[in-house]
Image: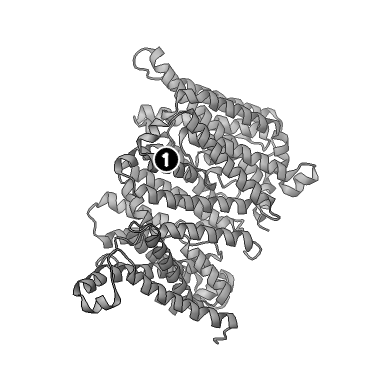
Amino acid sequence: MPDAVDASATATAPAARKAPTDTRPALRLAIVWALALAAIVAVLTVDVQGPLELALPRRATLVGGILIASFAHAVATVIFHTVTSNRILTPSIIGFDSMYTLMQTLTVFAFGGSAIAATDGLPKLIAQTVLMVVAATALYTWLLDRSGGGVLTLLLVGVVLGLAFDSLSSFIQRILSPTDYDLLSLELFGRLSSVQPDHLPLAFGVCAVVGGVVWMRRRRLDVVLLGRDGATALGVDHRRELIVALICVSVLIAFATALAGPMTFFGFLVATLAYRLAGTHRHAFVLPMAVGTGVLALAGAQLVMRHLFDAAGLVTVIIEVVGGVVFLALLLGGRKQR
Amino acid sequence: MTVRTARERRLLPALADVTALLVVASLLVGGFELSLTGLFTDPAQLEMFLISRVPRTLALIFAGIAMSVSGVVMQLITQNRFVEPTTAGTTQWAGLGMLLVLILFPEAPILLRMAFATVAAFIGTLLFLAMLRRVRTKGPLIVPLVGIMLGAIVGGVTSFLAARTDLLQSMAAWSSGGFSGIVQGFYEPLWAAALVAVVVWVMADRFTIAGLGEGIATNLGIDYRLITLIGVAGVALCSGVTSVVVGFIPFLGLVVPNVMRLVLGDDLRRSLPWIAIAGVALLLACDLIGRTIVAPMEIPASVIMGAVGAAAFLGFLLKGRQRA
């Protein structure tokens, strides 16, 4: 019963918009990635002041951040949509952002605002990620082990925990000194520009490992789209796929959040665009399409904001607002897609 | 008409007694020492009592009424028992309205702030209801998830605007709220909550019927849209005023109506006064806990309520899944 959404969310999936051949999605994929690569080159080279050798490393770090954030949020959101059988949610709402905020707030509360800068290093990044992943995995396995515990229940539990974390965070934020608070607030928004270069190798490693796991399961994920009964009938262990996928999701989101700050609607935005652009439901195309769309969106927003409006710091915020608006539009207007 | 079960006969008087005790305790507990005899012999004590302790307790009472009545009204309108102002985005919209008035008219009097917060809450709640009409698959859990997403968007826009205008910390201060700063002259707008409660009670039968759904309500001769509008307006007024005076109070509107429904059923005429009383008792208890466990500091009632409410919410979710 709790999964009444399943039917309608997946019903359209395999039948609708069957691509005539496989070349069409491949072509679309190539176009999006070509544009994404062009955007990256533009981010690296446009309007460089002074010698290129000086600007390039800094910009390369930014591009690294763009790639990591796009990959993590895009892949996580697509497989999250697949295993939860809905396309209107995004994994960040189940409490990752709130948990991240609470951890940062508690750090500042306990050790002062200078602690944030002082502890910003690999150990902290790893510790935060591990903590978030352990919490999420414990929640998934506990809830999905219970008989009848549906995915929606899981989501709502995550959301409620998130609300409770938020209320605690905002209380602690209230009693911080204004200086500490200013330092903290820098951490609480997505901030691609402050990604540390020495974090990138680890980040690429994490993405490669999780990406490999997801890629090997891409065909099984196609089957999971049929819903629990369909997948089981075809010999896929639905619950196991669910837990593997959710753990992948939590690793990706936790890492991306710890690296570049919370982004709530970015994943939703790129996944939604990717379903349209890919023209197929096969994960082999949808996943790379989502990553490419994410890169294109972040790099494009970076270019526009930096060179047209001179407000590069706002990139993630703009993406968030666009994502939020698309979400609203989809709920208000788009009956057909779901 | 008033057939009462044995369980009600035991529970309701106990609830009334507990609430009365909590009111007395709330009046007497605090940093400034008070004694019952002192109130009559020492004019300074009496003055302090009237300036700070009485307003605080009244504010708690009205906020408890406001949130629990809002919760039950929204649950009837949406026919979903997981909906309340914080899970439908209403309070986040009130927050946005409040921030806008701070940006546009920094010196705005408190009534103008409330007007902005209330109007924003009203618009936001109507938007939420409009979205619900469009969402084809209305599982019992998808409705609050949609509301929470909506609230997250609005909250994100609000905190972004606040960050750009250096109002972020005052936003955090105001939204986590609290009753510690309540003195005479600050809480009075909360009387609006009592007004809304009376209106809802007068129209209780119509709300009960509206809770059966638009089709049935219309068949029974109820103007469903009008009732919905009145309900949303009342909820928006309660949320707007409460947000401005004491901040967000999460989960109260969710926990209290659900618990009371288990005891009293769906007849709002009969259950509304008890829902309001139970809301008052719960909020007073949270405030007393917050005031005493870390005295002389204090934890805002909303934070305690967040923890208690989250636990209760999870309890409902995991236990009563079939009944949803």
Q: Which one is in front, B55 or B296? A: B296
Q: Is B269 placed above or below A142 here?
A: below
Find residue A21 and report its horizontal and vertical position in percent.
71, 31
Find residue A175 and report its horizontal and vertical position in percent.
34, 49
Q: Which one is in front, A84 or B174? A: B174
Q: Residue A77 is drawn in which quadrant? A: top right
User: Which residue extends farthest left?
Assistant: B43
Which residue carries the number 1 mark? A107
Q: Is A20 placed above or below B8 here?
A: above
Which quarter of the image is occupied by the N terminus of chain A?
bottom right
Count all numbered tags in the image, as a single digit: 1
Residue B192 visible, this angle: no
Q: Which one is in front, A14 or B151? A: B151
Instruction: Left or right? Give the position of B290 relative to A18.
Output: left
Find residue B30 and report its horizontal and vertical position in percent.
32, 65
Q: Is A221 placed above or below B16 here?
A: above
Q: Residue A17 is drawn in which quadrant? A: top right
Q: Residue at x 33, y 52 (%)?
A: B173
Which chain does the residue under circle 1 lie in? A
Find residue B221 and report its horizontal and vertical position in percent.
53, 78
- Judged from the image, the secondary structure of the residue bearing numbered disc 1 is helix
Residue B278 visible, this angle: yes
Q: Residue at x 55, y 72 (%)?
A: B261
Q: Amino acid at mark 1?
A: Thr
